[in-house]
Amino acid sequence: MHTNTPELRDKNIWGMVAEFERPRDLVEAGRRVHHEHGYKKLDALSPFPIHGIDAAIGVPRSMLGYVVFAMGILGCAGAALMIWFMNGADYPLVIGGKPLFAFEPSIPVMFEVTVLFAALTAFAGMFALNGLPRLYHPAFNYSRFGAATDDRYLLVVEAADPKFDIDETRRLLESLGARHVEVIEG
Amino acid sequence: MADLAIRNDPQVRPQLVQGGLSLHDVTEKVSSITEARTPRQWYIALAITGLGTAMLLGCLGWLVWNGIGIWGNNQPVGWAWDITNFVFWIGIGHAGTLISAILFLLRQKWRTSINRFAEAMTLFAVLCAGIYPLFHTGRPWRAAYWLLPVPNTALSVWPNFRSPLIWDVFAVSTYLTVSLLFWYVGLVPDLATLRDRAKSIFRARVFGILCLGWRGSARHWNHYEKAYMILAGLSTPLVLSVHSVVSFDFATSILPGWHTTIFPPYFVAGAIFSGFAMVVTLMVVARWIWGLENLVTMKHFENMNKVMLATGTIVGYAYATEFFIAWYSGNPYERFTFMNRAFGPYAWAYWTMVSCNVLSPQLFWFKKIRTSIPAMFVISIVINIGMWFERFVIIVTSLHRDYLPSSWGYFRPTIFDILTFAGTFFLFLFLFVLFTRFLPMIAVAEVKGMMAHEHMHDEVHAGAGAARVQEAH
């Protein structure tokens, strides 16, 4: 267990982690820390998504959907353009006297390319928005980090938060029912 | 057993995770399977399936060396076991996507225990399926010129986008890609769990890289849940489109028995039917080997058997409709094709199909049978045999006797047809053997999320005085 000794104050501190045993304790603590005490640089680590945590600690709504929608439209239009170019313009294929380009027989490919573009965007976009892949993160320095991918719920207060103070913040987190509070070096 | 009493009361839902497991127990149970010392049986299974896969590679190598004449397809039956097997394997895959995407959108919580396994099945089945059309071209390395829109000097012609075979290429390759992405996104949090549990630095590094540094931050989950929802929303129409497009390969032709508008829904229902049967077959075995009784409960099996009963009945209805329309159309060729299916030289295949697909799932009306592991294991295998025969009947009986009696024929498979088909089963199982050893076969994060949600839900109900729910637990 870390103590607030002068040596610790000199070190490069990234933040503080408080461990909770139940999801709703985490949500409640996050809500108090964010809404009542005005902390901004917060994060929560949990083994599965927790309902209500976004509003509690001020995580904005994901904008992934808009990106995916735009790329889906691009895929759809791109497929139509590709089919028109390949079969209608660059090398006209006359098959059974049918039009060189028509939408009806193009629909299956247009649909599949729409889905393909949208799915690839959802996949890559999700990781990009999350700043992943990132193989190192200061949060991993928490001594019991593995608990966050098993059955514990961690609330993180970053040292970059203007209200961050080792003693004050620790007292606050302990008063909210955290089982274990630890200062994390960066 | 108290559990049985609960299940008999339709007002009370049984718990999806039994045995009073805590969240940590779930992590432990699933992760430890991949962490334990490799059992000797695993090496035996790997050796057997590996040899079978080598046999498949040998068959395919011989095909490339010698030409597709080593298969039994010839005029008039130009498509035979290869396309039968292709449609069979693609169909198997559909249950995985149904479980992972459609049941997710319908908020069916029971999917969480089986979706990882079913999605793996989808991937492996689609890989097996892809082999057939690719090698049926005889020169798979040149297939890219014919099938994909790549500029080339070999043909100087682009693919014909009015051909359903090209639609099929787009549908199946998109399906494989999206299934892989969906599966991987689901795996990432569990890979992070394995990283954090790793005892050796090597294991920690491998899983650390595979999970891309996932740390379960609320900001991660925010985008993750959105991405998961989007992928489910995309996969749902995708999976329906894939088998619809596969059915277009037949339906857009003018062959009696193929040229029919019932094909897309009929193929999709059949695909889900066969896929669920395969999930049950594999899950029964996996549950028994790894003792997953508390996670994959009778409730899960019963639900899957109900899906088979419903889709099997739809398939039976489609068979009847086909017959009726063949008669009602007044088209003598259609009428002949259907009479020939049921009473011609392939009548044995037709009636195998009907008894396996229409009659056997009707046994699931009985709760005793629906909740009996041996019964559902046997029926699920019978259904898959039936569904293979369905594709065989559709393809071969329509081709072997078309308009001109002078060009009628009878298809017989060669030894290479048989070995190649057996080989894809070995490949499928080989991939499963690897999967169950190295990756968590149950979606741990999703099961835990579901348990936590259920728990909170119960607390709310108990607080409101609804004691019934609590009693049930």
Image (cartoon, coloured by chain):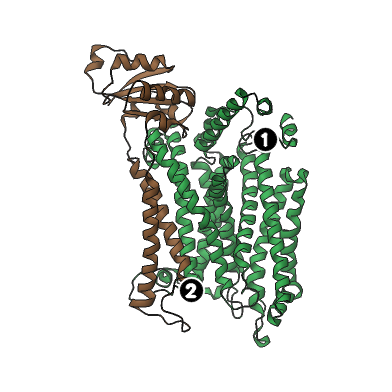
Quadrant for residue B370, please give it. top right
Residue B168 appears in the rendering: yes
Q: Secondary structure at mark 1?
A: loop
Q: Toward which corner of the image does residue B158 lie, by quadrant?
A: bottom left
Shown colour of chain A: brown
Q: Position of residue B452 (x, y in %)?
A: 54, 30
Q: Is residue A153 above or below residue B237?
A: above
In the rendered structure, the colour chosen for chain B is: green
Q: Residues within 10 Å of mark 2 (few under 14, many from 20)?
A: some
Of the pair B60 and A105, the residue shown nearer to us: A105
The disc, 2 or 1, on the residue closer to the chain's N-terminal end is 1
- On the image, the x and y values in percent for residue A74 come to 36, 59
SS state under label 2:
loop
Q: Give the image location of residue B139, x and y in percent.
A: 45, 72
Q: Which residue is mark 2?
A: B163
Neighbour tally class for label 1: few under 14, some 14-19, many 20 plus, Cα within 10 Å = some
Q: Amino acid at mark 1?
A: Arg
Q: Quadrant of the C terminus of chain A?
A: top left
Mark 2 or mark 1: which is in front?
1
